[in-house]
């Protein structure tokens, strides 16, 4: 059974369920012959990831001079976005440039060429001894 949108010569539109694509179109209630018309494309209810971090205002002017409602609405959007990025990390993009200046790296930002993995392990676990002695398993 296939659902078709039909239109008669008088301009009446209706939907009919036909057994197959080769079935004859039913006549309209007014008695006129009908033809098949393309179905409407349903664009409502589509999922949206919302604005990304890059779209977030990052200047005082961008926040409309700190307009409370504007800032609050962006905060709401970004909290939602953060939850989405936790679930789908591929949406977060490359956060290394930001992470290199946050948390443990606030006082001493990571620079290009630094042994990032070693420093990261040092900051996180206090020692890299375990990471350095770990040998990759041979297949
Ligand atoms: Zn009609």
Image (cartoon, rainbow, N blue to C red):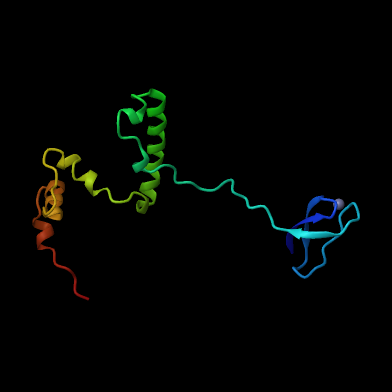
The answer to whether residue 5 is left or right of residue 99 is right
Q: Please tell me which residue lies in front, 127 or 22.
A: 22
The answer to whether residue 82 is left or right of residue 119 is right
Instruction: Work out whether 62 lies above or below 17.
Output: above
Instruction: Look at 28% across and 51% down and name the residue there.
Output: 94
Q: Please tell me which residue lies in front, 115 or 118.
A: 115
Q: Quadrant of residue 133?
A: bottom left
Q: Quadrant of residue 34?
A: bottom right
Instruction: Work out whether 135 lies above or below 8.
Output: below
**Residue 99: horizontal and vertical position, in percent?**
22, 45
The answer to whether residue 10 is left or right of residue 81 is right
Instruction: Work out whether 139 lies above or below 61.
Output: below
Residue furthest toward the bottom? 139
Q: Please tell me which residue lies in front, 90 or 30.
A: 30
The answer to whether residue 93 is left or right of residue 3 is left
**Residue 61: horizontal and vertical position, in percent?**
33, 28
Q: Quadrant of residue 75?
A: top left
Instruction: Work out whether 23 lies above or below 81.
Output: below
Residue furthest toward the right? 31
Instruction: Look at 89% across and 56% down and name the residue there.
Output: 32
């Amino acid at each position: 059974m296939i659902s078709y949108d039909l239109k008669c010569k008088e301009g009446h539109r209706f939907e009919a369920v036909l057994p197959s694509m080769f079935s004859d179109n039913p006549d309209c209630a007014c008695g006129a012959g009908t033809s098949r018309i393309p179905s409407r494309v349903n664009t409502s209810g589509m999922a949206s990831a919302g604005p990304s971090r890059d779209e977030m205002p990052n200047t005082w002017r961008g926040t409309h001079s700190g307009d409370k409602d504007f800032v609050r609405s962006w905060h709401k959007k970004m909290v939602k976005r953060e939850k989405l990025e936790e679930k789908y990390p591929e949406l977060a993009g490359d956060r290394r440039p930001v992470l290199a200046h946050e948390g443990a790296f606030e006082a001493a930002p990571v620079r290009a060429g630094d042994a990032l993995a070693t420093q990261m392990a040092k900051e996180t676990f206090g020692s890299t001894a375990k990471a350095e002695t770990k040998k990759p398993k041979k297949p």
